Amino acid sequence: MYVPPLSPASGTGRFWRTSAKIIRCVRYGCTNRPFYHIVVMERRKNQHQPVIEQVGTFDPMPNIYNERLVSFNFERIRYWLGKGAHLSTPAAELLGIAGFLPIHPRTYMTAWRNRQRAVENKVLETEAATS
């Protein structure tokens, strides 16, 4: 593959091709209504700086059917992972739940904590009802 030489003053140059990439969530939306784009960007960049490519979306607020909507472009995610891109923990969790990757350990811990909290709430409700 022929890569034309870039001038050192162009701003991207050879560094962009070899720098570490990461697949992460970038927050959009407004106050009390988050919405996330799942993007590929350089690892050292802030989330508000330009991204290389958007590969999905995530809406964490439940809709009227109590669903949290997620969409992925699995072909592009596979491409970037093949190029050596890293995954942030939230993105790895979402991809694990979607079945693209093994389920992330933090997902199991969150489910366990939710079950424990539900049991505790049920015990408190029964104690309050008997009193």
Image: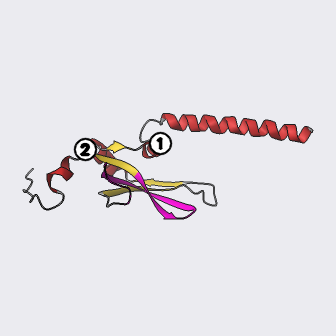
Q: Quadrant of the C terminus?
A: top right
Q: Is residue 6 magenta?
A: no
Which residue, as the protein is rendered here, is positioned at the far right?
131
Mark 2, Cα crowd under 10 Å, few <14 / some 14-19 / many 20+, is few
For residue 127, what is the image quadrant?
Answer: top right
At horizontal 58% and vertical 38% (from top left) the residue drawn is 110
Q: Label 1 sits on what residue type? A: Glu
Instruction: Please give left or right for residue 104 compared with residue 63 in the image.
Output: left
Marks 1 and 2, how far apart in space?
A: 20 Å
Q: Where does residue 66 sit, x and y in percent of width and height?
A: 63, 55
At horizontal 71% and vertical 39% (from top left) the residue drawn is 118
* Residue 108 to residue 33: above or below: above
Secondary element under disc 2, as helix, strand or loop, is: loop
Ranked by sequence position, the earlier of labels 1 and 2 is 2
Q: Residue at label 1?
A: 93
Q: Is residue 31 magenta?
A: yes
Tag 1 near tag 2, CB within 8 Å? no
Total of numbered circles in the picture? 2
Q: Where does residue 62 sit, x and y in percent of width and height?
A: 60, 56
For residue 10, what is the image quadrant?
Answer: bottom left
For residue 57, what is the image quadrant?
Answer: bottom left
Q: Which residues are magenta?
A: 25-48
Q: Which mark is residue 83?
A: 2
Q: Where does residue 112 sit, x and y in percent of width and height?
A: 61, 34
Secondary element under disc 1, as helix, strand or loop, is: helix
Q: Where does residue 60 sit, x and y in percent of width and height?
A: 54, 55
Coloring basis for residues: secondary structure
Q: Label 2 sits on what residue type? A: Lys
At horizontal 85% and vertical 38% (from top left) the residue drawn is 126
Instruction: Please give left or right for residue 128 compared with residue 79 in the image.
Output: right
Instruction: Please give left or right for residue 2 compared with residue 102 in the image.
Output: left
